[in-house]
Image (spheres, coloured by chain):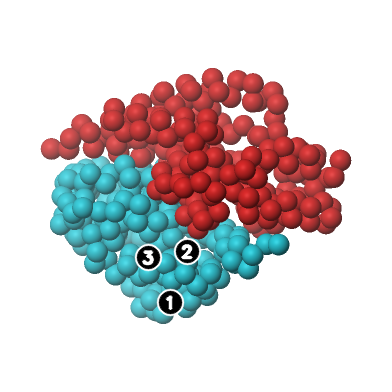
Chain colours: A cyan, B red
Amino acid sequence: MISERLKKQIQFIVEVDKIKNIFRRSKIHDGSRRENDAEHSWHLALMAFLLSEYSNENIDVHKVMKMCIIHDIVEIDAGDTFCYDVKGNLDKQEREQKAADRIFGLLPEDQAAELRELWEEFDAMETPEAKYAAALDRLQPILLNYLNKGGTWQEHNVKKEQVIKRICKIEECAPELWEFLSWLIDDAVAKGYLADK
Amino acid sequence: MISERLKKQIQFIVEVDKIKNIFRRSKIHDGSRRENDAEHSWHLALMAFLLSEYSNENIDVHKVMKMCIIHDIVEIDAGDTFCYDVKGNLDKQEREQKAADRIFGLLPEDQAAELRELWEEFDAMETPEAKYAAALDRLQPILLNYLNKGGTWQEHNVKKEQVIKRICKIEECAPELWEFLSWLIDDAVAKGYLADK
């Protein structure tokens, strides 16, 4: 006898395989194709434990890893919204809430609630764990854009000021990562990967 | 000033992006393409915390998640070895040890040692965490083969007996997952996805 609980868990695990078909704007290191949400989330989870020493607040790294793993699952229904897409970001919240209802709702009640809370905590960017996870979520595509000599910055005519605005909170939560990113962004401008103005 | 430590960590984080180009035999749910190691590792890390209640020993789920995230990094150099490939498995260990030396060696010494130990623990399949992670590593492609109505089983003429042999340790470490897998495999045979003999 397979329990109803396990059936629900397996149904969820199978459903979220669809995240492998949700493509982001960023390309992987060699520029050969866009990165998908599963790959991006894997990368963040790895960074979460390798870079945890740079968070200036004590963080529960296990919780951050869980956040990283599940933070983009809603995009299976809601799609990936490019961070510099002003129009797309207007109804992002509504689309994502509906997606969270359906997808997390496949799980047994306790786990549905746990994942929903983790995702909402990530999204609100208020707790130390959520701030640190958000920092990684910003750092990772910047590394990819740098490796791609501009990547989405050039494709979408993004300026240094917009990148800085999006990452300014990292200065508070992870000063050493901020310092590294400031250097990287200046170097990207110097190399012509990112427009200064 | 960017510290030497952070430089090494970033160098590693960038290097392992290559795992997104290491393709496995299994196809994703819709059969549209092969799955890569980053996606597979993401899926295992998610399953690790959703299915932890089925481990019959107390496990450190955080450690299992870390194992799942890093377990295939050596394949960047060593390539993916199909589990039913007898010849390819002969020199697998040597190729992977060499890969581990190079890739984990990019990290600061303490983290290189941590990841190396995690990977060796996973590979030895002796601790409760490693046994549970190995169970997930076997369960996940079986789900994908089932969704693909046979997938790699049919492509490589794999028989029920071979699948059972590969997963028999799950019975001991996660009996309820074993029961589910037994049902799934019998159903796959009944549906003609997997050859009985």
Question: Mark 3 packing: few (<14 Cα in 10 Å), some, or many (20+)?
Answer: many
* Secondary element at tag 2: loop
Report the front residue among B14 and B56.
B56
Instruction: Give the amino acid type for the residue marked by disc 2 in the picture.
Output: Ile
User: Disc 3 and disc 1: Cα gap in Å?
Assistant: 13 Å
- Chain designation of label 1: A
User: Residue B30 sits in which quadrant?
Assistant: bottom right
- Chain for numbered disc 3: A
Q: Which residue is mark 3?
A: A118
Residue at left 84%, top 55%? Answer: B190
Mark pair 1, 2: CA separation:
11 Å
Determine the image quadrant of residue A169: bottom left
Q: Nearer the viewer, residue A39 or A34?
A: A39
Q: Which residue: 47% across, 32% down?
A: B121
Residue for badge 1? A97
Disc 1 residue type (three-letter): Gln
| Residue B60 x %, y % | 42, 46
Q: Which residue is mark 2?
A: A73
Residue B104 visible (yes or no)? yes
User: Quick one: SS at disc 1?
Assistant: helix
| B143 relative position to B19: left or right | right
Secondary element under disc 3, as helix, strand or loop, is helix
Dividing the picture into quadrants, the one containing residue A69 is bottom left
What is the three-letter code of the residue carrying label 3? Leu
